[in-house]
Image (tube, rainbow, N blue to C red):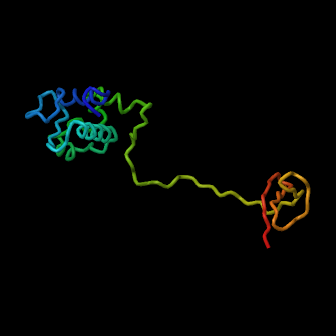
Amino acid sequence: MQANSSLMSDAMDVARGGQFMTIPNPYPASAWYHYDDWTCNYECMMIEYMYWAIVSYMGILDDAQTAQGISNEWEPYNATLLQSTDILMYALITDTQYKLPLLAPDGNYCPNTSSVSEINTNRQVVRITDVLGRETKENKNQTLFYLYDNGSVEKKIIIE
């Protein structure tokens, strides 16, 4: 992830008010992404930028207290603001070809439905065959196929 290397780097340069390899002091007034961690290089800032955009879209930041707390670094704190402010990044993260997560985890990881397969024990052996399909009797130490009246087949090896 380098400058001028992707749609995301282009979008971030717009969001920061220009392309900067180091943190400007101050950021241009037009910037809505003003990351100020001096230990974070351009590539690191791109990851942070993607994080802010996705969590804004998810609605994770959408309350007054959070918005105020992050405003020194990130301004479009919800999906509506992101869509109107950061058109390039909004288009990028909502493009289905990238398959980015856009729903916030809710902690509910249990499926709403479940099923139990009923085992049919009322079946009758119709035929027993060996691996070549020849009808045979039940033999020990040999791979056999049991064909049942319900159409099911079981492979058995009886070892004694």
Looking at the image, residue 118 sits to the left or right of residue 100; the answer is right
Depth order, front residue of 59/95: 95
Residue at image x 87%, y 56%?
Answer: 129
For this orientation, the residue located farthest to the left is 25
Would you identify the image quadrant in which residue 77 lies? top left
Looking at the image, residue 127 sits to the left or right of residue 154; the answer is right
Q: How many marks?
A: 0
| Quadrant where the N terminus is found in the figure | top left
- Residue 70: x percent and y percent? 19, 43
Residue at image x 15%, y 27%?
Answer: 30
Establish if 20 lies above or below 66. Answer: above
- Residue 121: x percent and y percent? 79, 63
| Quadrant where the C terminus is found in the figure | bottom right
Looking at the image, residue 157 sits to the left or right of residue 62; the answer is right
Depth order, front residue of 94/47: 47
Residue at image x 85%, y 56%?
Answer: 130
- Residue 71: x percent and y percent? 17, 40
Residue at image x 16%, y 44%?
Answer: 39
